[in-house]
Amino acid sequence: MRTIVLALLLGTACSGITAQELIYQGGDHSTPVGQHLEFLVDSTGTLTPEAVLGSEAFQGTNATVPNLGISKNTAWFRFTVRNRTAEPKLFLVIPYPDIDRIDLYRSHIGGIQALGSQGQAVEHSGSVTTRTGEYVFELDAPRNVPVTYLMRIKGHKQVHLPMLVASPIEAASISARWNLFAGGFLGIMLVMALYNLFVFLSIRDRSYLVYVLYIIINSGAQLTVMGTAQTYLWPDDQWLTVNASVLFVLISIATGILFTQQFISTARFSPKLHRLRPLFHLMILVNVVIYLLVDTTIGYKMAQGISGCASTYLLVMAISSWRAGSRSAGFFLLAWSFFLVGVLVFVMKDTGVLPYNEITAYAMPMGSVVEAILLSFGLADRINILRKEKERSQAEALATLRENERIIREQNVVLEHKVKERTHALQESNDTLKRTQTQLVNAEKMASLGQLTAGIAHEINNPINFITSNVQPLRRNIREIVEVMAAYRAIGPADADRELEAVRSKERAMELDESIAELDDIIDSIAEGSSRTAEIVRGLRNFSRLDEDDLKEADLNEGLRSTLAVLAPQFRDKVSIELDLGAIPPVECFPGKVNQVFMNVITNAVQATLQRPGDRPRVVHVSSIQQDDRVLIRISDNGVGMTDDVKVRIYDPFFTTKPVGEGTGLGMAIVYGIIQDHQGDIRVESSPGVGTEFTIDLPVRHQRANQQRA
Ligand code: ADP
Ligand code: MG
C-alpha cells in the first residue's frame, strides 16, 4: 500500500522499468540523477545495504525530482554513475535541506562501502565539502567505470530529492547560487525590517513594529525552510536544526495574522472575522504541542493545514475589510496574493503538480520578498492615512476648542456681569461701611468734644465766678468812692471846713478806706479769674486744632500741655500728672490729630488709674524726648494694666473692656490710624495690676511732606 502511494508520488513509476546508468559527460551543467534512480520502500526500516543492494524490489521512476511525500518510511535509492570525463572527483549534490538523514553507500567488489551520512538529524560526517542548505557527497568515480550507489533516506517532513551529479566547480556554483539567493533574500528582508523600524521609532505607530516583527519571523521561517538558518545560526543544535522550520512557520502564521489585523485595522473593518484570531492562536499552540510531543509527521501535516486555513482566513478578512473601505486592505491583498502565489507554487511543487527546480524551490521566499516590499509600500501609504486621521482629529480638536472658546466667552460675559453686580454691591456696602465708620469716628469725636465741653464749662465757671462775684463789690466800692469824690468836689470856698467835715464823716460812715483797701483784692481776684480764663481759652485754641488738616511744624510739648489742660477737670484732685517734657524739636505733623492721640491715650491712662481699687496715689507720667530724628512721647500710668489677651486687641475697632456707655472701643483704633498716617509707631508695655506704658514714636520730618518736597 505504502509503496503504491510513494509510487504515485514519485510520478509515473513503472514497475519493471530498469533505470539507465547515468553517464556523466561533464559540460556546462550538472546532471540530474532523477530518472536514473530506482527506489524501494523499507517500511520496517531495518533493511541493511547489503540486503537491499541486489534486491529485485527496486522500481524505476521517470521523475526528474522524486517526491517522497510526508512519511516516516525509509526509502532506498539505487543508481549507477559512469564518469566519462577526466574529472577525478565527482559530487552528488542534494539541494534540499528538509531531510532527516541521508546515508550513501557504494557497491564494491568486496561488498558495500559507506560514503557518509548527512541530514538534519545527523552529526554531519564523511565526505562533506559544503553545507549551506544542500547536501554534498563526494563520489569516488573512476574514469569510465560504472559504480553503483545506494542511498537511504529518512525524513518526517515533505521530502524531495533533487539530486545532481556535478564536477567540483559546478557543485561550488550550486552552493554559491543558493547562498546568493539566501543572502539576497536576507538582505532585502533586513532592509525592510530596519527601514520600518526607523519609521516606527520616528512616528511611533505600532503597525510598523508589528511589521518588523512579522518580517523577522517570516524571514526566519523562510531561512529555516531553505536550511540557511540552521547552517549559519545554530550549526551544532541538532534538535533546533530538525524542528526549526516547522516551529518558525507556525510562529510566522501567528505573527502574520497579528500583523494583518493591525495593518488593515480588521477590528474596525471586519470585526466578526477579527475575533477569530484567538482560535488560530489556539490551533497553532495545539499544533506545536502535537508536533513536539505527539508525532512529528502528524504535526507537520497539521501545520500545512493550518497554513492553508490561515491564508484563506487572511484573504477573506482582507477582502471583507477592503469592501468595508479599508485602503490598507487593498495593499495587503496585492502583497498577499504575491506571497500566496509563492506558497501555491511551493505546495504544487510539493504535491508534484509542478516540477522541482530552482524557481519552484525559491518560489516561497521570492513571494515573501515581494510581499514584504509591497506591504512596506502599504505601510508608507499608511502615513497618508495617519496624516488624514491626524488632520481630521486636529480639525475636530480645533472645532472643540472653538466651541469651548465660545462657551468661555459667553461665560465670561455672564461672569463679568456678575462681577459687576457683586462689585457694585461691594462698593455699596463699602460705602455704607465708610459712612458708618465716619459716623462712628465723628461720634467718638463728639464724645470727646462733649467731655471737653463739660470740662471747659466747669473750668471756666470758676475763674468767671471770680470775676462776676467781684463785679458787684467793685461797682459798689467805686460808686462809694465816686460819691465821696463828688462830695469833695462840691465843697465850695464859702463853708469849706464844715462841708469838708461833713464829707469826712460820711466817708467814715461809709468806711471808704476799707472799700479802697478791698479794691486791690477785688481787682486781683478779677485779674486772676480773667488770666485763668485766658489760659483755658488759649489751651482750647491749641486743642481745637483737632480739626485742622494742614501739615504743620508743631511743638508737641505744647500739645501735651494743652491736652492736659482741657482734660484737667476730669482728674484734678483724683489723679496726679507728672510732666517731664524734654527739649524736642518741632515735629512736622497734623497737630490736631496728634493732640487727639494724646487725648485718647491720656484719657485711657487716667481711666485705668481710676479703675484701680485702693488708696495708692494714682499717677500718670507724661514725658517727651528726642531720639535722633524722632520724638518719643511716653505716657505711663499705674492703673489696672492689661493682660496679653487685651493687649493684642486694643487697636481693634470697638474693642473695649469698659462698661457700655463708658467706652466706645474706638479711641485706640483712631490712635493707631493717626500714628500710621504719620509713619510713626506706637508700642505698649503693660502688666495687669502694675500699669501701662505707651510709647508714641513720631519722625521729626513727615514722610509725605518729604516726598512732596523732593
Ligand atoms: P475705650 O477706651 O473706649 O474702651 P480704646 O480704644 O480707647 O477704647 O481702648 C481699648 C481698650 O484698651 C480699653 O477698653 C482698655 O481695655 C485698653 N486700654 C487702653 N489703654 C489702657 C491703659 N492705659 N491701661 C489699661 N488698659 C488700657
Ligand atoms: Mg479710650
Image (spheres, rainbow, N blue to C red):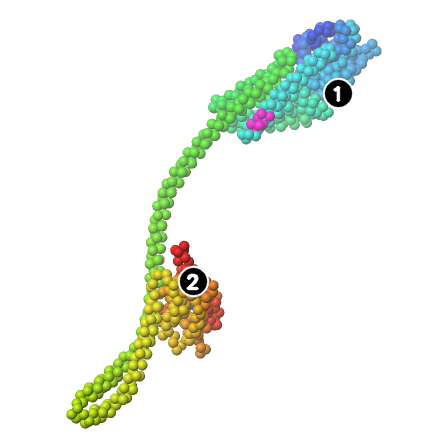
Residue at point 60%, 27% (across, down) = 213
Ligand 1: which quarter?
bottom left
**Mark with earlier residue (1, 2):** 1
Q: Which quadrant holds residue 678?
A: bottom left
Q: Helix, strand, or loop for circle 2?
A: loop
At label 2, the amino acid type is Val
At label 1, the amino acid type is His
Query: Where residue 173 sits: x, y (%)?
Result: 69, 13
Relative depth, front residue between 106 and 11 = 106
Range of the magenta residues? 194-200
- Of all residues, the one furthest to the left in this rendering is 494
Q: Which mark is residue 144?
A: none
User: Relative to residue 197, is residue 493 depicted above or below?
Assistant: below
Q: Is residue 196 magenta?
A: yes
Q: Which residue is tagged 1? A: 124
Query: Where residue 277 sits: x, y (%)?
Result: 56, 27
Q: Which mark is residue 700?
A: 2
Residue at point 24%, 92% (across, down) = 508
Q: Which quadrant holds residue 233?
A: top right
Q: Is residue 605 magenta?
A: no
